[in-house]
Image (cartoon, rainbow, N blue to C red):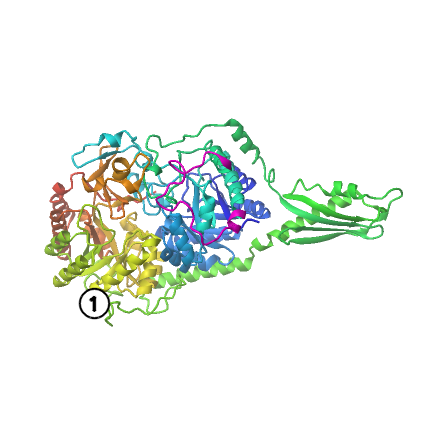
Amino acid sequence: MKEKEILAPAGSEAAFIAAVENGADAVYLGGKSFNARSYADNFEPADIRRLCRYAHLLGVKVFITLNILILPEELQKALDYARELAMAGVDALIVQDIGLAAALSRMVKPEVEVHASTQMTLMNSWGLAFAESLGCRRAVLAREVSAANIRKMKERSGMILEAFGHGALCSGWSGQCLMSSMLGGRSGNRGQCAQPCRLKYRLTDEQGHSPAAAGCQGQHLLSMKDLCTVDFLGELLDSGVDSFKLEGRMKQPEYVAVITRQYSQALGDELPVLAKADQKAEAPGGPGKARQGEEGFPEAGQAGKRRQILAHCFNRGFTSGYYLRRPGGHLLSRHKPNNQSQVDESLLQTARDSFKAPGCRRRREIFAELTALAGEPVRLVLRDEKGFRVQTASDEPCGEAKGEGASQAGLFSQLDRFGSTLFNLKEAKIRTDGKAFVPASLLNRLRRRAAEDLEEEILASWRRDEAYARKMAGVQAEILTELERRKTRVQTGGGFGLCSWEQPERENPAGSAAGPESQGFAVHGNSAPGSFTSGNSAPLTLTVALDTLAGLKAALSAGAREIYLGGQGFQGQDSLIRPRQLAEAFRLCHQAGARAYWSLPRFIHEDKLGKWREAALGAAEAGADGFLIGNPGGLILAGELGLQNLVADWSLNLYNDLSLALLADYGVARACLSPELTLEQIKVLGLAGMEKEVFAHGRLALMVTEHCLPGTLLGQTPQGDCGACSRPCRKNRWYLKDRLNFSFPVCPDRACRNWIYNAKTHCLLEHLSALRQAGAGCLRIEACQESPAWIDAVIRAYDQGLKALAAESFDKEKGTALKKTLAKLTPQGFTAGHSFRGVE
């Protein structure tokens, strides 16, 4: 029996059958609402109920994707829909939205599990601890984690780890990509991604020149190859992967059939080897080491044959992804972003034959015991290898045959007719005295009755009764009632109950007994500057995100008093990441009467946890007034260290009040809302005692890639060896130019990942009145990549606007005039983002 899992995709009923019949241990699919593949056929609840019955009879689990962010106006509907899915008999719900995940854990467990989607951006054991605190049983890891780091995560966490095994790769970190959203209004966080990463781009320098070496490698600079792990499943198993997710809900059922069969068989080959292996041995081919050839794929042997078969399905070329090697050119398919498979009609026909109907290839093996003795009732027992067992008997005793009675062979022939079921009779023990007369009609009735009883016995654990339905409805009502209370009244103790993690008593890591109030931080709606106050008279405060000391001095000189410092640190500039620099930055802020927050990096791999834990403690000891957190795992670190005055960044994808209530339970007092929300949606959001922050000005990071674009194009070997990079990122500032001639800044950070910023500058300077009406308390200015002159001009323009607003003399004409003063600093123009148009 398999101990690990192949999780196959299904975007249609034919694909669902193809997955099950070809060996899937579990199948994931989307309903008609709230899933990240809205263009697939998807399924109605009645379809899901019927397919769950079919899958469960074969021992296959069914997971439903609710893996999009939930808008404020959708909360009630999303919770209602989850209850409907739970009653349909599904095994798990895969969820992105952190507030929804916590609420569903209260509602649907233990009958239905909640799994943390890869869209939650879980990359380390802190993130796993966060997902576990929500009530999640399993985490779908970010694609960017290595096998070596998965091993470390498994050692530190009891979560079930699900990792991608095959299929399309996103160019940017999942859950952190706004490119489709901001460029075309179709949000990947809402299941509407238009795949701008498959379009053509040119890499250019500041003068607009495109190096010949970059152009000759193709124009689809963001297009990734497809992941293929079929030849190193053993290494991933040894690292701690429990489930291999096959991507492909938008693919044809033939594709699903082939990949599921190959991976199911490959996993079956690997499990006996894994059982004998030393679990503590290092897996071969760690990060930075290629295994065989450019991608390490074997050309011979069973794994090589499987890869050759997979090459006949849809693919963009194959890569081992981030598991075994440092991110590099081996990930990319720049010349061609679409299908590169070699069509094999015989393979496709074999695949089609495998999903003609449920049970055409896969059945549940059962065993029978039949007793037919003259003068006694005929007795039939059916059982399976899992221990399910039923027994039935005829109402009347057998008569005695006038001639030769029923034989064992004859009875077996009549019994072995389970073709209309999903059962296959593997073995039968038949006892007869040779005298009994057993009519075929009698045995047929017994067989049908026993088969039906066995089906019901097997399905009993998935049966959802009215008591369960009432329990879910009651919990949902409690959650929504408490949420309404929290919107109007400050929480004074006990928490919302959405997270299971118990916060330790918070102390100042620097040794001071001072709490938030003594540091001047605004909490729970007090009257300190920057505090949230409901109503249109709320003051608006500027917050500025900075990365250099020169930028900080410009911001303070211009009057900024809420500063976010540090973070990832960028190549080519003197980033505020060293302890002495930060200490000096905090000193300057406090000297100017400003509050300084240290920004925990958004991306931290498992092998860097110790480094950043020490950095967080160092920032607290150096005088940080608060901490900006942009990844779920950061909330766990903050709780462990007792960090004070937490601000949640927009990268946590804060869409609704459920998420805000969850963060409040973690001690968050200010939350920067998702840039995908409209001002009208922001207006209805908000908890008493929590400041609402809105991204107001600057270039928005649309995508973050784990690999370096300039490096893979210009600095690495033809094999994509990151270790031999010539560091072109340090010699120029680089841009991606699209087909419309917009240039998107490409900024490598200190870990060589690339932050791709919007060509246009986000600007809400004309809309200060609307922001105040929406209840915003803080307006974020993103200035990590900007010059001191830009920082000075932008802060002064907003300061003038806010002063006019406070004096009730601000209007759109005033805002337009102020905006024009910034035009020279913004050559590619402005955008208001989704403030008024929303997202699909």
Residue 198 shown left or right of residue 111 in the figure:
left
Q: Is residue 478 magenta?
A: no
Give the farthest residue toward the right: 402
Span colored in magenta:
272-301
Q: Secondary structure at mark 1?
A: helix
Q: Amino acid at mark 1?
A: Gln
Q: Name the residue located 18 percent from the left edge and 63 percent from the top edge.
A: 529
Residue 113 in the image, given as x and y percentages of width and height: 48, 55
Q: Is residue 297 magenta?
A: yes
Which of these two is toward me, 465 or 796? Answer: 796
Residue 194 lies, with reference to residue 26, above or below; the image says: above
Q: Name the residue located 70 percent from the left edge and 46 percent from the top edge.
A: 427
| Residue 488 can be seen in this image | no
Res 730 quadrant in image: top left
Q: Label 1: few (<14), some or many (≥20) within 10 Å?
A: some
Q: Give the main secondary structure of the magenta stretch.
A: loop
Residue at mark 1? 519
